[in-house]
């Protein structure tokens, strides 16, 4: 065990998200104090990429000694040292096998940030809120049915202790997702959401990801446990949390969902991505598979159950989510997203393929084109333009493309800071919107029950 202090920059943005309204002010006069617990995913650094003035400059980190916390601190130092808009933070780091007990006993902050091993995360959440600490957690907060039960108890404990437990749903801040939701609220343009069928869902979302990628301009090094679905969780309970969240958020905005009544899972499936030894070494910097992965290795090839599909009905609306993990994207491409919402008057479609130069583009596809409908679309669109100046419509063969001012395309990494700002506002108010907690529970019920069903197939 050892203690060490170093300057940390990026902890600001994360800190913004981790404000607590129940703790006394620090010597700097700021009531928001961060605790970063066992950072093992690069999201722990991304949320700290930008400064938030409300946050105390001292951040306490509790973690296992090893490469993961070192990588996290290196990213923070890079944010600190950059020439443009640098951050200035002092991190106090404790590493040792008793890091969790040490954090809970010392309580050096009032908001815990979690982004790391998902097998441990749900227990960390529960113990943190039991101790009266706010928690901002990376997704997923639960990776199986047992974890879902613990998470339910954690939400009950958070309510009892008057603290806020929240997950980082960055995809709500991607501009095409935001505008798709906004346009679906316009009956003159969209009509009403169709119900669809299990074979032809009314809402579909597909996400394609890659194990090897660049983050903050550098090749991403993933921990070996990321490839162990017992620790990371299968793809059907990981990335799909974003997709399920977007469906709930877009189709039933600001509505409370009851997972016992409103969700019926009709089908679920999963499959593995094959990783060769050379690929594993490239992304982990390890020469061989650790013992805990041997169960998934055959003829030197590692099988990772990272892919999955869920077919389900939400309040009678048939939906499908699908996630695919490849090893590496072709040159000039990256992670992609496809989304469609089917209304009685139009389909709202997000595509991100070669035609779109691998950038997400939102389209309005008319069910029946006519001059009268075209005029209705133009008038309705003005309501959204008033909230998002700089967006416009461009006619195409099937309807219109939504032309978006580049100022809204801030990139995935910036969305963590936007989540931080939102969470900080909730902490100042002392509450989340009434629908957020039941809908988080509904989301994790959907993913964990789908995993249970997929494993039976």
Image: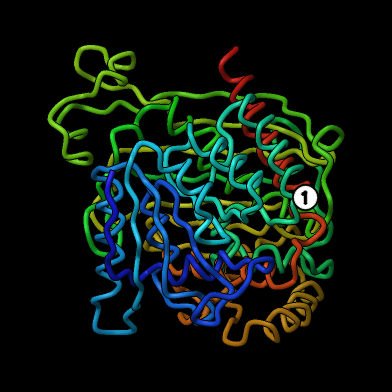
Q: Nearer the viewer, residue 425 or 209?
A: 425
Quadrant of the snapshot with the N terminus: top left
Which residue corresponds to the image point at 68% horizontal and 69% vertical from the top-left?
21
Task: Pick whichever, 229 or 376, lies toward us.
Answer: 229
Residue 385 in percent (x, y) is at 67, 83
Above or below, comparing residue 254 to residue 208 in the picture: below
Left/right of residue 353 with respect to residue 378 in the rendered view? left
Q: Dot 1, how many residues are within 10 Å of its Cα: few (below 14), some (14-19), or many (20+)?
A: some
Picture residue at 67% right of the left edge, 26% below the top: 449
The quarter of the picture where residue 162 lies is bottom right
Residue 309 visible in image: yes
Counting from the top left corner in percent of width and height, residue 216 is at 29, 64
The furthest residue to the right: 261
**Which residue sits at x=62%, y=56%?**
134
Q: Name the residue under label 1.
A: 159
**Can you say which quadrant of the picture contains the C terminus?**
top right
Q: Quadrant of residue 66?
A: top left
Horizontal and vertical percent position of residue 31: 59, 74
How far from the left and from the top, in percent, is residue 195? 81, 43
Q: 167 above or below 65? A: below
Q: Nearer the viewer, residue 24 or 212?
A: 24
Q: Which residue is pictured at 33% across the width and 22% down the height?
A: 303
């Amino acid at each position: 065990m050892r203690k060490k202090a170093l300057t940390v920059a990026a902890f600001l943005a994360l800190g913004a998200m981790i404000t607590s309204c129940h703790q006394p002010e620090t010597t700097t006069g700021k009531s928001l104090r961060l605790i970063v617990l066992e950072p093992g995913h690069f999201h722990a650094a991304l949320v700290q990429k930008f400064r938030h003035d409300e946050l105390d400059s001292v951040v306490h980190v509790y973690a296992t000694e090893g490469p993961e916390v070192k990588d996290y601190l290196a990213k923070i130092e890079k944010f600190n040292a950059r020439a443009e808009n640098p951050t200035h933070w002092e991190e106090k780091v404790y590493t040792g096998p008793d890091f969790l007990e040490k954090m809970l006993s010392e309580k050096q902050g009032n908001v815990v940030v979690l982004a790391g091993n998902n097998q441990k995360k749900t227990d960390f959440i529960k113990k943190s809120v039991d101790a009266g600490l706010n928690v901002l957690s990376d997704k997923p907060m639960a990776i199986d049915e047992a974890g879902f039960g613990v998470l339910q108890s954690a939400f009950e404990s958070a309510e009892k202790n008057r603290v806020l437990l929240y997950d980082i749903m960055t995809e709500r801040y991607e501009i095409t997702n935001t505008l798709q939701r906004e346009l679906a609220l316009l009956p003159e343009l969209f009509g009403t959401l169709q119900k669809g069928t299990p074979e032809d869902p009314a809402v579909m979302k597909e996400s394609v990801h890659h194990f090897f990628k660049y983050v903050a301009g550098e090749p991403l090094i993933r921990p070996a446990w990321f490839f162990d679905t017992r620790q990371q969780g299968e793809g059907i309970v990981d990335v799909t949390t974003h997709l399920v969240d977007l469906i709930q958020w877009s189709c039933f905005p600001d509505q409370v969902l009851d997972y016992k009544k409103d969700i019926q899972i009709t089908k679920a499936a999963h499959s593995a991505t094959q990783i060769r030894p050379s690929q594993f070494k490239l992304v982990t910097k390890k020469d061989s598979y650790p013992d805990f992965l041997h169960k998934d290795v055959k003829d030197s090839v590692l099988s990772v159950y990272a892919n999955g599909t869920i077919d389900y009905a939400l309040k009678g609306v048939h939906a499908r989510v699908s996630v695919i993990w490849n090893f590496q994207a072709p040159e000039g491409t990256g992670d992609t997203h496809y989304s469609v919402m089917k209304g009685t008057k139009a389909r709202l479609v997000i595509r991100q393929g070669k035609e779109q130069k691998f950038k997400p583009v939102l389209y309005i596809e008319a069910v029946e084109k006519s001059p009268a409908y075209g005029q209705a679309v133009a008038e309705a669109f003005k309501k959204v333009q008033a909230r998002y100046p700089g967006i416009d419509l461009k006619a195409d063969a099937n309807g219109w493309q939504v032309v978006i001012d580049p100022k809204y395309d801030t990139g995935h990494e910036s969305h963590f800071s936007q989540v931080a700002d939102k969470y900080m506002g909730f902490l100042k108010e002392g509450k989340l919107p009434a629908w957020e907690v039941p809908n988080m529970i509904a989301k994790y019920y959907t993913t964990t029950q789908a995993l249970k069903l997929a494993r039976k197939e």
